[in-house]
Amino acid sequence: MKESFWAAMIVGLGITSIFLVYFFQTVTNTSEHNYELLKETTEAAMYDAFDFAAYEKDETIRIDQERFVESFIRRFAQDASLSHNYDISIYDVHEEPPKVSIQVKTLNVGFFSLGGSATSFSLTNRIDAILETKYKSE
């Protein structure tokens, strides 16, 4: 009887540890994927929104706000995970000098049932980006 209790406890402990490893791996992978996606998408959208006409006219480095938002949403939607819901908040877009502040909240991450009640939480990633260029002085 004593040996069977120990065997049941070890099996239960093993199943619990596998669940915990799976849960934390899912959360870590989701957070890392969202951060890398946010960083790469922001950089690409800023380059897409670069205003070449202003640069050719008087070498002013600026971005177009509408083009940035359109490009960011399109690029983010192409690469986002379909298993999550996202809440994208664009807080600040300065056209000159080029600076953006974006927050992406992933909803319903880690959805699981604990004691009969459903538990979920959200992950939030935020980035403040400045467009850097190589300046050639003459």
Image (tube, helix red, strand yellow):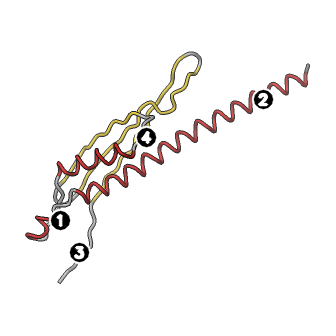
- Crowd around label 3: few <14 · some 14–19 · many ≥20 (10 Å): few
Q: Amino acid at mark 2?
A: Val
Pick the quarter of the image with the N terminus: top right
Residue type indicated by callout 4: Ser
Q: Quadrant of the C terminus?
A: bottom left
Q: Which mark is residue 61?
A: 1
Q: Residue at x 21, y 58 (%)?
A: 98
Asked if the residues shown at circle 4 and circle 1 are in contact, with their CB atoms under 8 angstroms apart, the answer is no
Give me the residue at 61% from left, 37% from top: 22
Gap between marks 3 and 2 measured at Cα: 63 Å
Q: Earlier in the sequence, mark 3 or mark 2?
A: 2
Q: Secondary structure at mark 3?
A: loop
Secondary structure of the residue carrying tag 1 is loop
Q: Label 4 belongs to which residue? A: 81
Q: Position of residue 19 (x, y in %)?
A: 64, 33
The mark nearer the N terminus, 4 or 1, is 1
Task: Give the structural element (helix, strand or loop) at label 4.
Answer: loop
- On the image, the x and y values in percent for residue 108 come to 45, 30
Amino acid type assigned to the residue bearing label 3 in the image: Tyr
Amino acid marked by disc 1? Ile
Name the residue carrying label 2. Answer: 11
Q: Residue furthest top?
A: 116
Residue 24 sits in quarter: top right
Which badge, 4 or 2, comes first in the chain's sequence?
2
* Left or right: 135 in relation to 81: left
- Alpha-carbon span between mark 1 and mark 2: 62 Å
- Marks 3 and 2 close (CB-CB < 8 Å): no
**In terms of sequence position, does the residue under pointer 1 or pointer 3 come before the other?**
1
